[in-house]
Image (tube, rainbow, N blue to C red):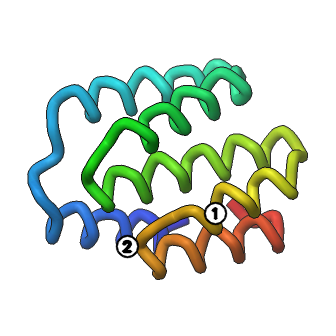
Amino acid sequence: MRKRLITLAVVLACSAPVCADYIADRKAAMDLVKAGKNEEAMTAFIEMAETTTNAAQESDALEQAAMCAHRQKEHDQAMQLARQIPLVPMSALSEKTSETGIH
């Protein structure tokens, strides 16, 4: 988890500034995760990934969507989402997480 957060922080710091809408949308989706609504959160993260033009944001949203799928025991979908992550380090980490069950 710590390694994932460090990777995400580095990627976001090196990329274009994060837009306010993405931050608000991410917070709303994370609130769904905290409420145990992983299906709804996964849908929100997938929509976020589809609408952003920023690779770091797309990678973050797809990683979160993959983690939601994993929590729902939808391991094949988690792997499919992880493989779509455009930033290779985050993609590899998400795939490993989906395979091992560590999150």
**Amino acid under label 1?**
Ala
Quadrant location, the N terminus: bottom right
Position of 41 relative to 12 (above/below): above
- Write the residue at 75% across / 44% down: 69
Dot 1 surroundings within 10 Å: few (below 14), some, or many (20 or more)?
A: many
Say which of 96 and 62 sits in front: 62
Which label's residue is closer to the chain start, 1 or 2?
2
**Amino acid under label 2?**
Thr
- Write the residue at 48% across / 68% down: 4
- Write the residue at 31% across / 60% down: 56
Residue located farthest toward the left when viewing the structure as drawn: 17
Residue 13 shown left or right of residue 7 in the figure: left
Quadrant location, the C terminus: bottom right
Position of 79 relative to 43 (above/below): below
Total tally of numbered discs in the picture:
2
Please provide percent x and percent y for residue 7. Answer: 37, 73
Q: Which label number is shown at residue 7? A: 2
Which secondary structure, mark 1? helix
Residue 38 shown left or right of residue 45 in the figure: right
Position of 98 relative to 46 (above/below): below
The residue under label 1 is 82
Say which of 44 and 99 sits in front: 44
- Write the residue at 64% across / 68% down: 83
Please provide percent x and percent y for residue 94. Answer: 62, 67
Q: Which label number is shown at residue 63? A: none
